[in-house]
Image (cartoon, rainbow, N blue to C red):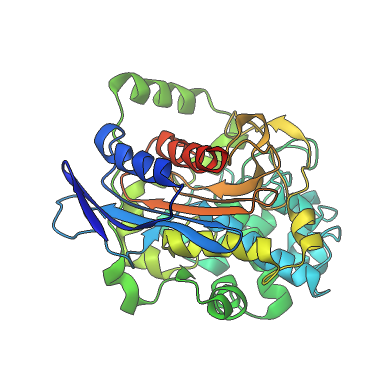
């Protein structure tokens, strides 16, 4: 089904009653700077929204297709969390055990007592590699180098006393625990135990044969005022934030590099369709992936705080963050999910039976709760109320 509306052609399906979602999706193109995007929603296990539109490249030569893959940045963290919780459910991982039980080298620099749950809830203090050891993008592409550096790294704040967003280190640390338990890189484990069995078009470490389906990530458009404010924020940032965000500083265009696409960077380089993300979260609701008890554990809040890296108030659960008072995933404060740098998201509200995924290639400047995402999520729950 396609409908010509002004300058954007909307493709896909939208069930009766969910017309507000289609309107919000279209409005993102007309009023919120969308280039190419897809949005999918399941309700009580049935797909009720599956929309895509726009362009897969900045030059507008490749239309966004039903199977366009997009780098979803930190939305990948939710997929990694699913792997950890699956291992816990199988009795192979104790979330309260020290990380060093599985990864002995991690005990260095006073980290011997840090439990696995503090990796999942961003409370380890290891927000990244310290600025005394500057690294470049090539190091991020090297799994062994990154995990060795993080194993040796001293925490940037006292573990367990606060949350500090582990922007890149999350994926390497949780991923290395998974690798030590299973003997498999996290992307391989995810493919064989989660994406493959569920038939999800979601990859951590994208085969070169699939690169041609990728959308081109486009840097955020920022006003001079916003750019100035960002520069000031970085200038005033302390070691906790700088280790997370600038060593090295990852920019949107890095995701277009074939080496980035093929590497396993499980905090930031998952490639997925919106349909796959919605289906992943839908599988958390219908019991086909994890038990209800495990999902409840995964979405149990670890205490509301102002994160030391992002400077935002939120409540981390275990590998996800909660909707909280920001209503990041709809009106339910215990809805959960994870956003990606620039705008993408995946989330679920178990009480409402809703799961959703959003992908896009025109990046926004925010780490979470992009206005386009929020417009779509709010439209989903408005549809349920109508």
Q: Quadrant of the N terminus?
A: bottom left
Side (left or right) of 262 relative to 305: left
Q: Position of residue 170 (x, y in %)?
A: 62, 54
Q: Residue at x 52, y 59 (%)?
A: 278
Q: Residue at x 32, y 67 (%)?
A: 258
Residue 113 visible in this rendered orientation of the protein: yes
35 or 349: nearer the viewer:
349
Say which quarter of the image contains residue 44.
bottom right
Q: Position of residue 312 (x, y in %)?
A: 60, 29
Q: Residue at x 45, y 47 (%)?
A: 18
146 or 28: nearer the viewer:
28
Q: Residue at x 58, y 41 (%)?
A: 329
Say which quarter of the image contains residue 221.
top left
Tell me: residue 30, above or below residue 9.
above
Tell me: residue 335, above or below residue 63.
above
Residue 147 visible in this rendered orientation of the protein: no
Q: Position of residue 277 (x, y in %)?
A: 50, 60
Side (left or right) of 79 relative to 332: left
Say which quarter of the image contains residue 274.
bottom left
Side (left or right) of 120 relative to 266: right
381 or 185: nearer the viewer:
381
Report the label total.
0
Side (left or right) of 288 relative to 114: left
209 or 356: nearer the viewer:
356
Q: Position of residue 271 (x, y in %)?
A: 43, 63
């Amino acid at each position: 089904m396609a409908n010509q509306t002004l300058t954007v052609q909307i493709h896909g399906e939208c069930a009766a009653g969910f017309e507000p979602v289609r309107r919000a999706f279209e409005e993102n193109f007309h009023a919120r700077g969308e280039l190419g995007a897809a949005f999918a929603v399941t309700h009580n296990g049935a797909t009720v929204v599956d929309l895509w539109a726009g362009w897969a490249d900045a030059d507008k030569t490749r239309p966004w297709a039903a199977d366009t893959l997009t780098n979803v940045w930190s939305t990948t963290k939710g997929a990694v969390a699913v792997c950890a919780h699956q291992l816990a459910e199988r009795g192979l991982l104790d979330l309260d055990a020290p990380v060093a039980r599985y990864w002995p080298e991690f005990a260095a620099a006073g980290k011997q007592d840090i439990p696995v749950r503090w990796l999942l809830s961003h409370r380890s203090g290891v927000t990244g590699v310290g600025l005394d050891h500057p690294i470049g993008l090539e190091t991020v592409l090297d799994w062994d180098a990154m995990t060795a550096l993080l194993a040796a790294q001293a925490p940037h704040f006292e573990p367990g006393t606060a949350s500090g967003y582990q922007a890149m280190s999350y994926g390497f640390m949780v991923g290395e625990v998974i690798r030590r338990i299973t003997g498999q890189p996290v992307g391989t484990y995810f493919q064989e135990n989660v994406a493959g069995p569920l038939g999800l078009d979601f990859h951590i470490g994208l085969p070169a044969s699939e690169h041609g389906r990728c959308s081109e990530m486009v840097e955020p458009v920022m006003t001079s005022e916003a750019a100035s404010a960002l520069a000031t924020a970085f200038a005033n940032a302390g070691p906790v934030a700088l280790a997370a965000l600038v060593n090295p500083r990852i920019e949107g265009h890095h995701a277009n590099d074939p080496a980035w696409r093929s590497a396993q960077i499980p905090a930031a380089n998952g490639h997925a369709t919106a349909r796959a993300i919605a289906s992943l979260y839908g599988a958390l609701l219908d019991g086909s992936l994890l038990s209800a008890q495990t999902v409840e554990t995964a979405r149990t809040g670890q205490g509301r705080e102002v994160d030391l890296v992002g400077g935002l108030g939120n409540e981390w659960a275990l590998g996800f963050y909660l909707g909280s008072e920001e209503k990041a995933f709809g009106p339910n404060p215990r809805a959960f999910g994870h956003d990606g740098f620039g705008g993408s998201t995946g989330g679920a509200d178990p009480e409402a039976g809703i799961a959703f995924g959003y992908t896009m290639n025109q990046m926004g400047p925010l780490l979470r709760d992009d206005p386009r995402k929020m417009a779509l999520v709010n439209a989903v729950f408005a549809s349920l109320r109508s």
